Amino acid sequence: MGTFGAVIRIREPLPTTRKLFDVGAAGPLAGFVVALGTLLYALATLPPPEYLLDLPGHEALKAHINQHGAFPETMPETGSGAVTIVVGQTPLFWALSQLFPNVPPMYEIMHYPVLFASWFGLLFTALNLLPVGQLDGGHVLYALFGKRWHGRLAHVFVLVLLASASIGFAESGPGLTAWLVSWVSPETAARSGLMSNLSWFLLAGILYYFLSRVFDGDQRFVAPALLGGVGLSVAARLVGSPRAAARSAGWRLPSSCSASACARSTWCRERRGHAPCFPNTRFLYSGSVRKNRRKTARNHF
């Protein structure tokens, strides 16, 4: 899957911002039309739920389909070592799915190639419309508001993304830190308290790198923005799970940990014999921390 890789060859500089707007908007509009048409075709030609009965595994799902003839409302329990990819819905995808029967749940959509491809088409179109840099969204923003406001609004948008990432890091930070440390010392990675504390340094480093680029290294702006980002993450962890408190309808790609793996904690604890879950990294990763985590992590990622 390729994105952020388009090259546009223009024979001469665009004479007006209207021409720039046309060039920036043409690509996303064409991509959206194709993705929407593919989505409608995929929804109209969906097989019945029994289609999944021919796939290996999925025992709990198969049992529910055999009993009820439909998909379960919630994700069934997954076995140890299972990997579950759960993609998020958008208002458009949800609205169209209400018009057709036998729409699979989002944790099984990868078994429907055309439907999955159309979902990715909509995702990449949305990414291309981000109002920053050389993306088509950045071209459209530049054409509408000019160079001065384009720079200001793009900076604000990046700061909003960093703030959102800081809030999400409150939940995924300890697990992500544990996974990184596990490549060097699996025993140290199993110490949940230490990983929770180290996650703040990881967040500060990530924020400092991006904020330095946003503000061209001007510490008068980098320092307060850095403190604000870390403060948001601390507040989110004190309040509770940000995903449970506010679930967005945007292009969110959550993973769903099984009850036996995570229960109510934000990442799997050592006493349950499981490795960290990464709620905001699109995967469910479960396995014994006493096994060779390096090998498991390499095979998984």
Image (cartoon, rainbow, N blue to C red):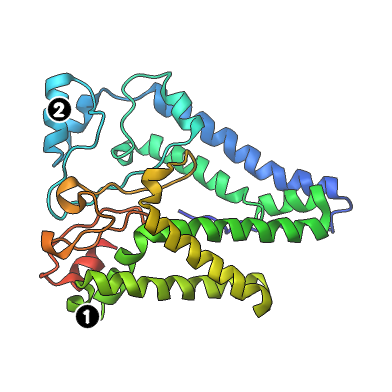
- Left or right position of 103 against 152: left
Relative horizontal placement of residue 51, taking residue 174 as reference (left or right): left
Instruction: Answer above or below: position of 56 versus 222.
Output: above
Q: Camera-side residue: 283 or 162?
A: 162
Q: Position of residue 281 (x, y in %)?
A: 36, 57
- Residue at (48% x, 44% y) in the render: 251
Q: Which residue is drawn at 41% across and 29% down?
A: 42
Q: Find out whether the residues at labels 2 and 1 contact each other: C-beta distance under 8 Å.
A: no
Q: Is mark 2 on a helix, strand or loop?
A: helix
- For badge 1, the amino acid type reads Ser
| Image quadrant in which you'd find residue 155 | bottom right
**Is residue 25 in sight in this rendering?**
yes
Kind of residue indicated by mark 2: His
Q: In this view, does 278 lie above or below 177?
A: above
Q: Is residue 215 left or right of residue 238?
A: right
In this rendering, the count of numbered labels is 2
Report the mark closest to the observer, 2 or 1. 1
Residue 77 locus on image (x, y percent): 16, 41
Q: Name the residue carrying label 2.
A: 64
Tell me: residue 192, above or below residue 35: below
Label ID, residue 84? none
Q: How crowded is mark 1: few (under 14 residues within 10 Å), some or many (20 or more)?
A: some
Say left or right for 22 vs 287.
right
Disc 2 from disc 1: Cα separation? 41 Å
Query: Does residue 113 lie above or below 146 as drawn?
Result: above
Point out residue 20 in the picture as x, y percentages from the top left corner. 79, 50
Badge 2 density bin: few <14, some 14–19, many ≥20, Cα 10 Å: some
Mark positioned earlier in the residue sequence (2 or 1): 2
Can you tell which quarter of the image residue 271 is in?
A: bottom left
For label 1, the residue is: 185
